[in-house]
Image: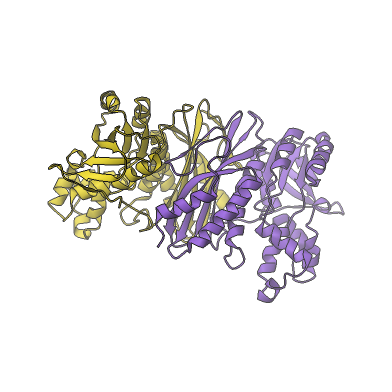
Chain colours: A purple, B yellow
């Protein structure tokens, strides 16, 4: 049995105690940092084994990587940049130390990708693995983009394409023979979207600079996350079905298992694309900034209305869009 | 079944979104705050049902209160002051919403006590309750007191008295007839020490101002926590047994069940008293500051030595002091 202090010593070695701005790193009662100019952005997310990940398809390295990335995505959705992370890991008594170190390895890799210094945390025993990451970032004073700033007539935009993570989930549930068949590029690409999501930090800052008035990351599905912007902004939204950027792999998936690509794009979760509103006149500059600097597409999918959430079909007919995305409690 | 969004709405009402310094509070992708002058102090702690609390003796209100308090204590042990808190709560599917609201009520009460604004978090499903609190505080630039600054010859001091929480734990394990007998003042006082610990924020700041060179909160037992100061400071410690402030209730407890009060004071955890080192000449000012301003006692229990951890008995004999306090993994 490894003791708490022994594990803390091992973990300390993979953490980054001497990064810029770290005054007191791992191994004290609390960490002390210099945040520098601007306002602090704070977020915390918990992932629970078998609720947020399936241990049969997610490696410990992927788990650690994703736990950091989804928190970074929350900061990106405010237009902020992540700086410092604390980890709280509850593990079962029988968990091998090597497994814990792989989780930390994944966290460290993601942390390096996003310029985050992992500077401490807590490891405790439980009967199931629960991984919490708390991130602190910063944003220029007064420049955070909330969910509450959307205004009537503005364009609704989204980065990248939607539905790939939900497609991967559908694929992984489709039976062991399909799970093992991940031979084609599109299958690998889908699974990567689910297992190795990317947080769009630079894109979030660029959208904020370009004049985004409201922003959220698409973690629970386009429809549900858009309904949250509408609720906080006290507005409505009209989404044009033909303009929704559907992940291209979903067309191929639909040839193998019975899925509706559009349904996955509208209601599938865990895309971590950024959904924002902005004055229509700001779109072209925002689009070219994201394309030039990050190779990321930006698409107008609709516009802000007075009230309600509606979907417009290509024939011009409209229907209510139910915000029935991914609900952790459903 | 209550949905995630419904629970989030209910929780939002008990949180403090409009406290000073809160730019974006509950209900967005991340919180945004103004930390003000100084450096940021960051900490996170996770409590797991049946590992960190016994649901048969801890009420949800006490649980919430304690989860905030133990984090505040970590910031106090740096000489900092807490400002903002984020909560991540994993609950079982069958958990009644009323139970969750009582946990939040306890967190809110503690938050108000310590001037903390609870500004967000995350609620997810699990099969056992896991409560994580992440706190952000501040400390004057360059004034954080780490575990690593103790110097040869300095006094080792501790606030208050030790062992009461461990005594309460022993009492609660001593059988149902004793558990229900909590009729006397000393019994209630012991149980309060365990269930409603107090974080010594003002005392931590005063000790920092008075010249404390190293500091830690006694969460895992005096011996183990002192060994952590020694390790980080690369020094040793001599503790005089007769000078250890033993919680007075433990003498009465020892008349009822078989416990060694000194053993509880040396190795019992969860006291949340502050253990510090300081130049001997600084002690008298520190003692009177804590007494005058907070009614808190401060006691010299020994001194910093070259190496090793030793206990001196009243007859002058010395023996090694094993740092075998509370280890969450033992």
Vertical relation: A15 (above or below) A284: below
Q: Residue furthest bottom?
A: A177
Direction from residue B248 to residue A89 in the image, left or right: right
> Which quarter of the figure is the N terminus of chain A placed in?
bottom left
Q: Position of residue A253 (x, y in %)?
A: 77, 67
Closer to the camera, A144 or B95? Answer: A144
Could you say which quadrant of the image residue A285 lies in? top right
Q: Which x, y percent locates residue A233?
A: 67, 38
Q: Residue B84: give x, y in percent of width and height.
A: 49, 36
Which residue appears at 30% of the width and 32% of the height?
B154
Residue A157: in sight, yes or no?
yes
In this view, the residue in front, A176 or B246, is B246
Q: How many marks?
A: 0
In this rendering, would B134 be left or right of A284?
A: left
Q: Tell me residue B124's x, y (percent).
A: 53, 54
Vertical order, A208 against B4 (above or below): above
Identify the residue shown where x is 76% and y is 47%. A159
Question: Which residue is outermost to the front?
Answer: B306
Q: Quadrant of the C terminus of chain A?
A: bottom right
Give above or below for A233 relative to B206.
Answer: below
Choose top left, top right, bottom left or bottom right for residue B245: top left
Q: Can residue B130 be seen?
A: no
In front of the other: A307 or A140: A140
């Amino acid at each position: 049995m490894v003791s708490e202090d022994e594990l803390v010593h091992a973990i300390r070695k993979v953490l980054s105690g001497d990064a810029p701005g770290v005054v007191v790193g791992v191994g004290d009662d609390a960490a002390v940092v210099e945040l520098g100019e601007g306002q602090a952005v704070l977020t915390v997310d918990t992932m629970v084994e078998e609720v947020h990940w399936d241990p049969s398809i997610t490696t410990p390295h992927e788990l650690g990587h994703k736990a950091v990335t989804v928190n970074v995505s929350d900061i990106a959705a405010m237009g902020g940049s992540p700086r410092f992370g604390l980890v709280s890991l509850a593990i079962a008594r029988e968990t091998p130390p090597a497994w814990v170190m792989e989780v930390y390895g994944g966290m460290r890799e993601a942390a390096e990708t996003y310029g985050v210094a992992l500077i401490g945390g807590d490891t405790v025993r439980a009967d199931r693995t629960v991984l919490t990451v708390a991130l602190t970032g910063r944003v220029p004073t007064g420049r955070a983009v909330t969910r509450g700033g959307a205004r009537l007539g503005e364009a609704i935009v989204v980065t990248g394409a939607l539905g790939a993570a939900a497609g991967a989930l559908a694929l992984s549930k489709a039976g062991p023979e399909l799970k093992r068949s991940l031979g084609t590029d599109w299958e690998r690409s889908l699974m990567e979207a689910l297992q190795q999501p990317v947080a769009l930090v630079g894109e979030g800052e660029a959208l904020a600079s370009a004049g985004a008035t409201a922003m959220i990351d698409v973690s629970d599905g386009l429809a549900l996350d858009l309904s949250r912007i509408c609720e906080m902004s006290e507005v409505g939204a009209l989404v044009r079905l033909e303009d929704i950027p559907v992940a291209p792999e979903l067309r191929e998936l639909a040839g193998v298992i019975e899925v509706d690509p559009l349904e996955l794009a509208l209601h599938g979760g865990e895309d971590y694309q950024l959904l924002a509103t902005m004055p229509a006149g700001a779109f072209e500059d925002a689009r070219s900034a994201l394309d030039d600097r990050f190779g990321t597409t930006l698409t107008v999918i609709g516009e802000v209305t007075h009230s309600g959430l509606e979907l417009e079909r290509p024939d011009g007919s409209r229907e209510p869009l139910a915000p029935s995305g991914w609900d952790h409690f459903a």
